[in-house]
Amino acid sequence: MLEKLEEAGCPATERFFNVESCSEAVGGGFRLPDGVVICSNHLSAQEEVSHALTHELIHAYDHCRGADLDWTNCEHHACSEIRAASLSGDCHFKQELLRGNTGFRGQHQRCVRRRAELSVGMNPHCKGPGRAKQAVEQTFEQCFADTAPFDRIP
């Protein structure tokens, strides 16, 4: 992902990565202008850190390539969350099994929708009954199909 960010014109230096103790029950975040935040108090295994880093770097990639990306726009945010959940490993079969989600057919898409809705729902601009779900549903097909910078879902 770091190579892909650089190719897109947004190289990430050491200062782009921050490790913090986070009050929210999240593994990380993408925060402008700071960059990627990893929550040391919510991640306990290397695999969790790797998934969180990849997830947040996908947001950074989306921000880099989208000159008009507006994180206060629920649909824009939903699109990046859909892509990050799908492409980062958040919804790999093993992860879902550990969460107790054991469906086979369509499980990846259900996971992506669920996790994107949770993330968008944390955006203060996307509060309100059903707003996060609406944004995810409205953007799902197009954003799920966008696997850049990968050729396919890893």
Image: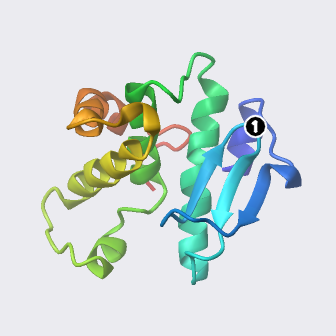
Q: Residue at x 25, y 27 (%)?
A: 138
Task: Specify the color scheme.
Answer: rainbow
Q: Secondary structure at mark 1?
A: loop
Residue toward you, 53 or 106: 53
Quadrant assignment for the C terminus: bottom left
Residue 64: name its quadrant.
Answer: top right
Q: Is residue 153 visible?
A: no
Q: Can you say whether 6 is above or below 14 in the image?
A: above
Image position of 66 (left or right of 25):
right
Q: Amino acid at mark 1?
A: Pro
**Residue 90's spot in the image, x, y percent?**
42, 62
127, above or below 26, in the image? above
At 20% from the left and 72% from the top, the residue drawn is 101
User: Is 26 rendered above or below residue 3?
Assistant: below
Residue 52 screen position, x and y as percent: 56, 62
> How would you rate the neighbour count of disc 1 (Cα within 10 Å): few for under 14, some for 14-19, many for 20 or more?
few
Q: Residue 14's x, y, as percent? A: 87, 55
Q: Residue 30: x percent and y percent?
A: 62, 47
Q: Which residue is mark 1?
A: 33
Q: Quadrant of residue 31?
A: top right
- The outermost residue toward the right is 14
Residue 20 visible within the image = yes
* Total numbered badges shown on the rendered structure: 1
Q: Residue at x 62, y 60 (%)?
A: 53
- Residue located 66% across and 74% down the image: 40
